Image: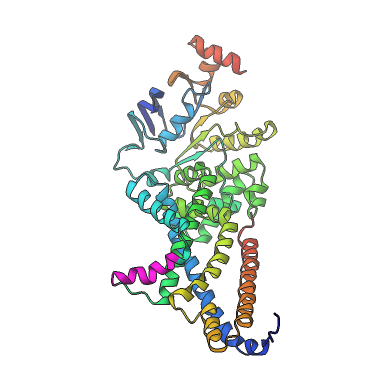
Amino acid sequence: MIEIENVRKSFGPLEVLKGVSMRVEKGEVVTVIGGSGSGKSTLLTCINGLEPIQGGRITVDGTVVHDPKTDLNKLRQKIGIVFQQFNAFPHLTVLENVTLAPRKVLGMSREAADEIAVKQLSHVGLADKLMVYPSRLSGGQQQRMAIARALAMSPDYMLFDEVTSALDPQLVGEVLDTLRLLASEGMTMICVTHEMRFAREVSDRVAFFREGLIHEIGTPAQIFEAPEKPETAAFLKAAH
Amino acid sequence: MFNYTFHWHQALRALPDMLWGALVTIEVAVLSMVLGIAFAVLLAVARMSANRLAYGAATTWIEVARNTPALFQIYMAHFGLGSFGIHLSPWWALLAGITFNNAGYLAETFRGALRAIPPTQTRAARSLGMGPLRAFWSVVMPQMFRISFPPMTNQMVWAILMTSLGLTVGLATDLAGVTQELNVRTFRTFEFFALAAVLYYLIAKAVMLGARLIAWRLFRY
C-alpha cells in the first residue's frame, strides 16, 4: 500500500505540491489527471524518492520513503517507474537495457536475467527486437521497452508518468494497450495521463489535480459523469 | 652547399635497435593513456562536484596540465620532485609527466561529454535501483567514452609524440633516446632522425587505424 500524507514539495520558491494526501491499495489502478504544472508528475518522482519533499510523509508498505535511514535503492526495486521521455539506454541493446538492472542490482546470472527479459519483452510485444539498439525503435517501441525494463525488476507497484505524451498519435494505442494488459493482470498502478478515455476505462479511481492539490477523487463514474466540483467539470469539458 | 652524402644503410642497419626503442615508446604512451583516462574520469567528476576541495584540486590539476609546456611537466616529475628527495627514474618521470598532461586534457573532454548526456539517463538508472556509482559506471560512462572517442584518439597520438621529450630527462631506451644515442655515436643526424620520424608517423597512423577498428567494434549503436 502506498500512503501519501499531506505531502508538500517546492522547487525553490515555487510550491508544486501543497499538501497532497492519497492512499493506493494493492491491486488498485489510480489515474491522475489535471492541467500541466498541477504537480501530477512531481508526485510520482516523490513516491520513489527521486525527489525530496519538504513536508508530509510517503510510506510504501510501511517504509517511510524520505526517512534518511531508508535504503532507497532497495525500495526502488519494488517501485517501477516509466517516464514521458522513454530514457532508453542508447548504448545497450533492447535485451541489455532490460537485463542490466536484474544483473547488476539483483545480482542475477546472465541466463536468469535473459530469461526474465525475454519474457517481459514478449509480454510487451518486442520479442523480435532483442538484439536491436533503441535508436532503431519507434517511440512506441522504446516506451514499451522501458515498461519491460521496469517490469523485469518484478516491482509491486508501477508508476507511469505521462507515458504517451511524447508519442506520435498513431503510436499511443500500442502503449495504452500494454498498460491495459498490466491493469487486467492486477498490477498496482498510478498513471499520470492526459488520455481521458483510458483513465475512464482502466481506473479504479481517478484523482483530479489542481494547483498542487487533489481537487477531487473518486471512481471514474463519479469523476467523469457526475463531478462534484465545477473546476473538475470544466477541466473535463476542455479535455474532451 | 649540398655536398652531403647520405648514409642510409647505416641508419637502416640500426633499424632493429630503433624498433625496440619504438616498443618502449608505445609502452609508455599506452600506460600514460590508461592511467590518464582513469585520472581524467575522477577529475571530470570532481570538477562537477559540489565538494570545494575536490573541485579546487581538480581545477588546479587541469589548469596546470593544459596551460604549461608538457616539457616542464616532465621536467618537474624528474628534477622538480628530485629537489624534494623524490627520485623518479627517467622512465617513471616521463610516464608521470605524460599521464599528468593526458589527464588534464582528457578531463575537460570528459566533462564536455558528460554535459551532453541527459540527466534523465541517471534518473532512469537510479529508478531501477542502481546506486550512484553503478549508474555512472554502467549507464553514463559508456556513453561518455563514445562521445569523447575522437578527442581521445588525438590525445593518444599526442601522447606518443610527447614521449620523445623523455630525451630531456635522459631516457635512452625509447625511440627518441635510441635515435639520439645513435646520432651521438655516428653524427648521421639527418638519416637517423628522418628514420625515427617515419617510425613515429607510422605508429601514429597505426593508432588512428586501430582506433577506427575499436570504434567500429564498440559503438554499434
Please name the residue shown 44% across and 45% down the image: B126
The x and y percentages for residue B50 are 37, 44
Q: Main secondary structure of the magenta part?
A: helix
Image quarter where the N terminus of chain B lies is bottom right
Residue numbers of the magenta segment: B72-85
Kindly tell me whether residue B194 is visible in this rendering. Answer: yes
**A183 and B93: which is toward the camera:** B93
**B135 and B53: which is toward the camera:** B53
Kindly tell me whether residue B37 is visible in this rendering. Answer: no
The x and y percentages for residue A4 are 37, 29
Image quarter where the C terminus of chain B lies is bottom right
Give the answer, above or below, for where B88 lies relative to B61: below
Give the answer, above or below, for where B203 lies relative to A178: below
Q: Is residue A34 magenta?
A: no
**B69 and B123: which is toward the camera:** B69
Give the answer, above or below, for where A1 lies relative to B11: above
The x and y percentages for residue A65 are 35, 37
The x and y percentages for residue A43 are 44, 30
Residue A14 occupies quadrant = top left
Q: Is residue B74 magenta?
A: yes
